[in-house]
Structure formats: C-alpha cells, structure tokens
Amino acid sequence: MEDYRYEFIAPNEMMDIHLEFSIDPGQSVINKHYHDWIEIIYLIHGDLEVQINNRTTKLKKNEFIVINPMTIHSTRCLNGNTAILLQIPLAFLEKFVPDIWEYNFSVDLDSEDPRVQTKLGNIRSTLQDLWITYQFQVEGYIFRCYSLIFELIYILIHSFSQKVDRKELKKNQKNLERIQSIIDYVKENYRSPISIPEIAGEVGLNEIYFSRFFKANMGVTFLEYLNMVRLEKIYLDLLNTNMSIKDIQEKHGFYNEKVFRRMFRQVYGCSPHEARRSDLKKK
C-alpha cells in the first residue's frame, strides 16, 4: 500500500494497456490515488469495496465498475477475491478519439432496461474474452486483444457516457493539483502532528473552506485521511518487522491508542495482533 498519489501504471509487454488477473487473499487496502487511465475492475469471485470520491460501491461476484480517469479512488478487500483488472491510458485512446478527455463514463448495473442489461452482458463477455486471449497468447493475439478493447470502448462511449463541460474539466484539474499539494505535505510530515490551520496555510485556504474542500474531494475529513496514511505505514511494519506494536504505532505518529485500534479494525477487519498472526500463518 502506498500514499495517495498520482499513480504511474506500467503497460503489459507488447501492448499499450495494463491487463491482469488479480488474486487478492484479503485484508488489503489501496489508498486514495488517481491516474489518467480508464480503469475497469470485473469481479470474478469474492467481494470488493470501491470508493470513488464520496461514493462507496460494494462489488459482488460477476459485477464490474468503470473508474473515470483523474478520479480519486481507493479499494478495500477484507475476505479475498479474484478479478480482472483492465487499465487503458487516455493518451492511447485520444489517437482515435481526440476528445476522449471530455467523456465521463457511468454504468448502472441495476438498470431494469433490457437493452442496458444486454450491453452490460456484452461488456462482461468482452472482458472475459480479452483475458483468455491475453493469457494463451496464440499467434496474432495482440490484434485480437486490441479488437476487444476497441469493442469495449465503443460500447462505453455509445451506451454509458456523457460529455463533461470544458470549464468543469479545468475546475477538476485545479482541484486535483491542490489536493496533490496537500498530500505531498502529509507524505513528508505525517509522523508529526498536523493541525488544520497549518495545512490550510500551506495551500492558501482559510480553515473552514479547507475542511469543506478536502471532505468534498476526498470523501473523508483531513484528520481521517492523515490517520489512514499512518495506518498504512503501521500495517506494513506489522507484517515486515519484529518491532512491538506500540513502537510501530509511535514511530508513525499515531499516539491515540483507542482511536488507533478502532480505526485499524474498521479498515482491516481485525486487530493489529490478528493481522500479524494471520500474515505469519501465510508464510
């Protein structure tokens, strides 16, 4: 797990996209991040909680989600899952659709419209065919992979998209730049107490507006986010060092024992001791 950030995604060998079959044993959290790739997660088995801005979606077996580029999102898996992950860079798609940056994709899995359900079924089968094609890599597989990707984007554009106003795009970009400045500061200083006046001053906002701005864009309060960053560092040390839990907790600036244990259980579904024991059993 890493700090909230702009995420750099590596494409697959010989291709301009990132495609993988993910097996998650559970108790994993990927904190808030964003990137300029369209991301599609198709859940084969298990469960996955996806938070996009202020909205949390709980995926179940055979469901998928489309995450728009430059959208702040995070994922949490407590009980394990298997999934197909597809990420397509806008820089690749704009060669064919110059205004692709203006599209916003929204998929309603619960729609009662039979035509929509047919399209959703087409997306599922296309993702399945894409993974099978990439996995076996018979001669000419790259052409087949690209044809399936183009089919997928065609369905999304024609059935599940709307264009965003250019002014709104510029506003979103400005907000992301400001959020990035905040998170860069947290990354460097999370071990120390960071007050609202301090962080608001760093980005030139008054305290009240800063708190509203951060919650609106991140879906959590600044203090909740700060503690999440600390929790991630603590979780890694729990699994990779022999330090005592108390020493790890204090090393990463989390001094409130009660809040620490409550938040840890909320995020990882177990106590710090249980997380460490579970990891030892896996090894």
Image: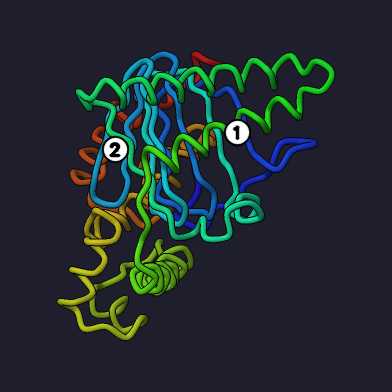
Q: Earlier in the sequence, mark 2 or mark 1?
A: 1
* Crowding at mark 2 (Cα within 10 Å: few <14, some 14-19, many 20+): many
Tell me the kind of residue under disc 2.
Phe
Q: Quadrant of the C terminus?
A: top right
Give percent across and percent down for residue 222: 26, 62
Find numbered disc 2 in the image and state the secondary structure of the residue it sits on: helix
Dividing the picture into quarters, in which one does residue 208 lie? Answer: bottom left
**Can the viewer see residue 50 in this picture?**
yes
Return the residue nearer the eye: 201 or 190: 201
Instruction: Indicate the colouring scheme.
Output: rainbow
Question: Label 2 vs label 1: CA separation?
Answer: 39 Å
Select label 2 or label 1 by which is in front. Answer: 1
Q: Residue at x 61, y 56 (%)?
A: 94
**Can the viewer see residue 278 in this picture?**
no
Give percent across and percent down for residue 169: 39, 68
- Which label number is shown at residue 149? 1
Tell me the kind of residue under disc 1.
Ile
Give percent across and percent down for residue 221: 22, 59
- Which label number is shown at residue 141? none
Taking the view exactly as shown, the residue that stands out farthest to the right is 139
- Badge 2 is on which residue? 264
Q: Residue at x 42, y 65 (%)?
A: 183
Q: Residue at x 48, y 22 (%)?
A: 83
